[in-house]
Amino acid sequence: MFKRGGEQSTYGDVMREEFRSELSMISRTLVTMSQVTRDQMRRATSALLEADQTDAEQVLAADAEVDAYYRIIEDRVYDTMARQAPVASDLRLVITTLHMAADLERMGKLAAHIARSALRRHPGSAVAEPLHGIFKEMGVVADTLATKITKAMSERDIVAAGQLDRDDDAMDDLHSRLFGVMFQKEWPAGVEAAVDAALLGRYFERYADHAVNVGKHVVFLVTGENLDRE
Amino acid sequence: MFKRGGEQSTYGDVMREEFRSELSMISRTLVTMSQVTRDQMRRATSALLEADQTDAEQVLAADAEVDAYYRIIEDRVYDTMARQAPVASDLRLVITTLHMAADLERMGKLAAHIARSALRRHPGSAVAEPLHGIFKEMGVVADTLATKITKAMSERDIVAAGQLDRDDDAMDDLHSRLFGVMFQKEWPAGVEAAVDAALLGRYFERYADHAVNVGKHVVFLVTGENLDRE
């Protein structure tokens, strides 16, 4: 999974090989965590758009799973650092995986917030009719982002990771349109629906921000090039 | 600043002493960062409540300073890890400081969001009249939290850190009251003001969550006892 230099087998080489292998194992767990997070958001969006109580409850129940993945990765990171004592760029690599796990955990929490909003208005809908199309598109963009970061991580594909900013822009546009609709004089759905929409919009937007962060971390893992986080 | 065991001067002891000294230096930078973050929120709250353009602009200008502190701490953490190669609990200590810096950076961003909201409605107010008292109280609670974490960090005071949950509960109560006022039938201020308030309430609430996280990290730094994060 990772490239390495010369083939002379010294003690340092063996350590390095072990380090790379442990890092790959952490990366594979990150991929799984990313898939779980994507599924959580998919189901939360469906719960929101269809006012589906079962979906919403499943998202809330599975949030503990996302947390568990974070703990697993954290423990592995500490183990790896304790046993391999990586320095310089290796150290940054392994800590980067910790940042990625934190971003993914937060994405899971945002999906849970969306599910909770859906549940709060059940059997009604937390999404006012004039905003249904926008939230549907936000769900599609969120899923695209999550799919791309999963692919970027599993295939070490920095092209996919590099496209995330465009999807994030699409999310920002949808977010602006949301306010445009709500702030029209003829907004029919009342204050409560507007407040729900403002918070839901924020959750989708933050989900996208964290996905972009994950993408930047993937680029760093693959190339060693550090990009600014959102 | 940190206690240590026996006094036999071995090579390991010297390393450990150096490590403790570097950790103390990182902690001092965290205290300064925490003061900057507190001042940012103070000024952002004032900008919000008084619709003060100058205050709002100062907050936005100083956000780069908060980011700079994060980078300084990150660099020092990597330096320390590279030179001291700490293991086990020492490793967790030094990574904890990185988490604290990330929480403080996020608190700074939330203060900037509040300043931006104030600026967007200037010369009007982003706070509808019926909510002025609640946001004033939220500002007080936010400042109390920031003051306590600064004190907890600078004096390694786990009593102060332990009181943060109560302040966080106070913030949650204020947050609930906010929705109570907005969802009354006679809400007079319209949809736009309600949307502003929903997002502002969220920013204050998240600020409090991050402050509580910082407090839990302080407890871990001082006692080695790990508490769950929010």
Image (cartoon, coloured by chain):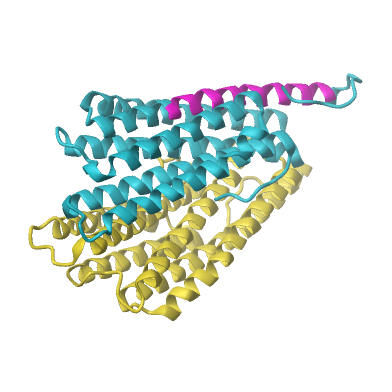
Chain colours: A cyan, B yellow
In the rendered view, does A109 fall on the left or right side of A2?
left
**Camera-side residue of B62 and B76:** B62
In the rendered view, does A91 fall on the left or right side of B4?
right
Residue A203, x across and y down, in percent:
37, 44
The answer to which image quadrant residue B87 occupies is top right
Residue A163, x across and y down, in percent:
60, 39
Residues in magenta? A13-38
Quick check: is B222 in the magenta stretch? no
The answer to whether one can see residue A87 in this image is: no
In the rendered view, does A118 fall on the left or right side of A159?
left
The answer to which image quadrant residue B173 occupies is bottom left
The answer to which image quadrant residue B202 occupies is bottom left
Residue at left offset 30%, top offset 30% = A60
Quick check: is A20 in the magenta stretch? yes
Residue at left offset 41%, top offset 68% = B115
> Magenta-highlighted stretch: main secondary structure?
helix
The answer to whether one can see residue B114 in this image is: yes
Residue at left offset 27%, top offset 54% = A182
Q: Is residue B4 above or below residue A85?
A: below
Residue at left offset 21%, top offset 34% = A119
